[in-house]
């Protein structure tokens, strides 16, 4: 029998590995995000990656790109009664958060400010800034109806982007719109359908089909041939009643007071059906047509639509791959994490003693990397230098025989090498820490 060498397998198209050193940027981003979220009182929620398909069909809307074309939906194996569940990889997380709120009766006493972070799945054509597994950080403020919370969500986004080094007006800009309430939308919808019918010959297959099912989406087009017709279409803003306008003006007043600049884009509708009143996007011009870094808005109808008590809610989702691409583009790079010390061990016989000493240093908070395996002193010193560590810890045979370690400063040529006693490592370990 001849043994065939197995062909190496590859990751699924559009799904990426994150490897060091790049993974350090992700960790840096996660830490920055948590710091900002905490200052606004947002708490973490984690929900399953797989949910019943029906949750997304009902939540996001049947006639949306995500549900129609992009969802990874499948039938699970049949149980012993021959019943198989219809499941889907989550394409977004708002529906899952709402499901969890209802399931755990979590909104019974008060509102909740929640954030999540994790992978989402959409079967789109992979390209720069568009993947089949991508990551979102998002926030959801549930149970609050006032325009203050819409504004808070936008301000939080600005702070987050700002603390990452992205400047409002330079790297990113805010687009804002108000979608009103269902009754206002249906009055507008009738006028819009009449307008679209009058220009039916311009619409492509998708557009023709959506003319009656989702006419607002027909306007949210990147097709240049449709721009003129879209610009001339009846504007939803002209159909808004007093309450919707008051809400919109309330949001704007806060944004104005906080110095947030924005443009009102009457054609901003967002890709999912559940939005009402405020919708917004943080956009960059530096990533081509994948320019939306963060999108969100109010979705007061969703919780009831998914079987809960009517509860107002507002939130956003931020695409982290796009955010990292943008940070690359504008030259924001976090400092790569480096160990404080690098342990050089000339002979394997001392290893037990060395490793016990390193444990004492780590217990005291020192990041110390052990040189792996045996190699010449010269090559170990080279590795120590390349590691970026401030100190080389040299565990030579003579030092170990005396219960000592030689400490050599690597970043300061004028500083001299010295020795310390291993038994008292807890006392002097602090010297190795930055700013000691
Ligand atoms: P787009 O118009 O770019 O397709 P969307 O309206 O489908 O975006 P949302 O569903 O609102 O996006 O998701 C929020 C954010 O998640 C987007 O603004 C974007 O930053 C990110 N995002 C969405 N889909 C992808 C994807 N396939 N790959 C990478 N990031 C994505
Ligand atoms: Mg999309």
Image: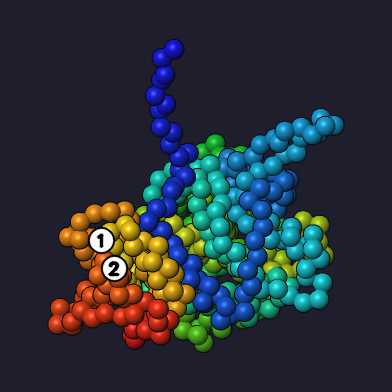
Residue 325 can be seen, yes or no: no
**Residue, x 57% and y 78% (percent of image)?**
38
Q: How many marks?
A: 2
Q: Where is 325 relative to 432, above or below?
A: above
**Residue, x 25% and y 67% (percent of image)?**
396
The secondary element bearing badge 2 is classed as loop
Task: Please state the horizontal and vertical placement of residue 317, each as a whole percent of the image.
Answer: 55, 62
Residue 395's tag is 2
Task: Please state the horizontal and vertical placement of residue 226, each as a whole percent of the image.
Answer: 46, 48
Instruction: Report if the beta carbon of the residue with label 1 is closer than 8 angstroms to ligand 1.
Output: no
**Left or right of 273, for residue 395:** left
Please state which of residues 367 and 275 is positioned toward the viewer in this rendering: 367
Q: Which quadrant of the structure image shows residue 425?
A: bottom left
Q: In which quarter of the image is the C terminus?
A: bottom left
Per the image, the residue denoted by label 1 is 346
Q: Please name the colour scheme applied to the rendered image.
A: rainbow
Q: In which quarter of the image is the N terminus?
A: top left
Q: Where is 75 relative to 329, above or below?
A: above
**Left or right of 72, for residue 291:** left
Label 1 packing within 10 angstroms: few (<14), some (14-19), many (20+): some
Label 2 packing within 10 angstroms: few (<14), some (14-19), many (20+): many
The secondary element bearing badge 1 is classed as loop
Do residues under tags 1 and 2 come within 8 Å of each other at their CB atoms?
Answer: yes
Please state which of residues 391 and 29 is positioned toward the viewer in this rendering: 391
Task: Please state the horizontal and vertical placement of residue 208, each as a whole percent of the image.
Answer: 58, 40
Instruction: Report if the beta carbon of the residue with label 2 is closer than 8 angstroms to ligand 1.
Output: no
**Left or right of 410, for residue 343:** right
View extreme (front): residue: 401
For the residues marked 1 and 2, what is the alpha-carbon distance in whole angstroms? 7 Å
**Residue, x 37% and y 84% (percent of image)?**
428
């Amino acid at each position: 029998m001849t043994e065939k060498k197995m062909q190496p397998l590859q990751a699924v198209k559009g799904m990426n590995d994150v490897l060091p050193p790049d993974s350090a940027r992700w960790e840096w981003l996660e830490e920055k995000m948590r710091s900002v979220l905490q200052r606004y009182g947002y708490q973490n929620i984690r929900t399953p990656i797989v949910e019943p398909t029906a949750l997304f069909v009902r939540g996001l809307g049947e006639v949306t790109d995500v549900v129609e074309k992009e969802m990874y939906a499948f039938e699970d194996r049949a149980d012993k009664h021959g019943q198989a569940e219809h499941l889907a990889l989550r394409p977004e997380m708002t529906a899952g958060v709402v499901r969890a709120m209802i399931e755990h009766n979590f909104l019974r006493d008060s509102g909740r400010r929640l954030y999540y972070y994790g992978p989402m799945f959409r079967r789109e054509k992979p390209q720069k800034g568009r993947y089949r597994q991508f990551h979102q950080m998002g926030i959801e403020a549930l149970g609050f109806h006032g325009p203050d919370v819409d504004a808070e969500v936008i301000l939080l986004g600005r702070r987050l982007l700002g603390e990452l080094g992205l400047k409002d007006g330079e790297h990113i800009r805010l687009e804002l719109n108000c979608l009103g309430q269902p009754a206002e939308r249906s009055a507008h919808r009738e006028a819009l359908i009449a307008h679209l019918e009058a220009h039916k010959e311009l619409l492509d297959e998708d557009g023709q089909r959506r003319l009656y099912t989702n006419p607002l989406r027909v306007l949210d087009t990147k097709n240049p041939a449709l721009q003129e017709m879209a610009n001339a279409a009846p504007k939803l803003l002209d159909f808004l009643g007093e309450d919707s306008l008051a809400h919109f003006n309330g949001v704007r007043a806060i944004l104005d007071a906080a110095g947030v600049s924005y443009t009102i884009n009457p054609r901003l509708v967002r890709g999912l059906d559940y939005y009402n009143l405020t919708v917004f996007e943080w956009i960059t011009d530096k990533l081509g047509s994948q320019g939306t870094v963060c999108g969100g808005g109010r979705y007061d109808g969703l919780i009831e639509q998914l079987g809960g008590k009517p509860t107002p809610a507002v939130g956003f989702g931020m695409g982290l791959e796009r955010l990292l691409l943008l940070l690359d583009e504008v030259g924001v790079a976090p400092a790569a994490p480096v160990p404080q010390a690098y342990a050089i061990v000339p002979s394997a016989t001392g290893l037990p003693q060395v490793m016990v000493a390193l444990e004492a240093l780590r217990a005291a908070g020192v990041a110390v990397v052990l040189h792996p395996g045996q190699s010449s002193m010269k090559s170990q010193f080279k590795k120590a230098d390349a590691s970026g560590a401030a100190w080389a810890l040299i565990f030579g045979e003579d030092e170990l025989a005396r219960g000592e370690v030689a400490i050599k400063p690597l970043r300061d040529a004028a500083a001299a090498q010295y020795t310390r006693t291993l038994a008292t490592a807890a006392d002097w370990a602090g010297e190795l820490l930055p700013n000691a």
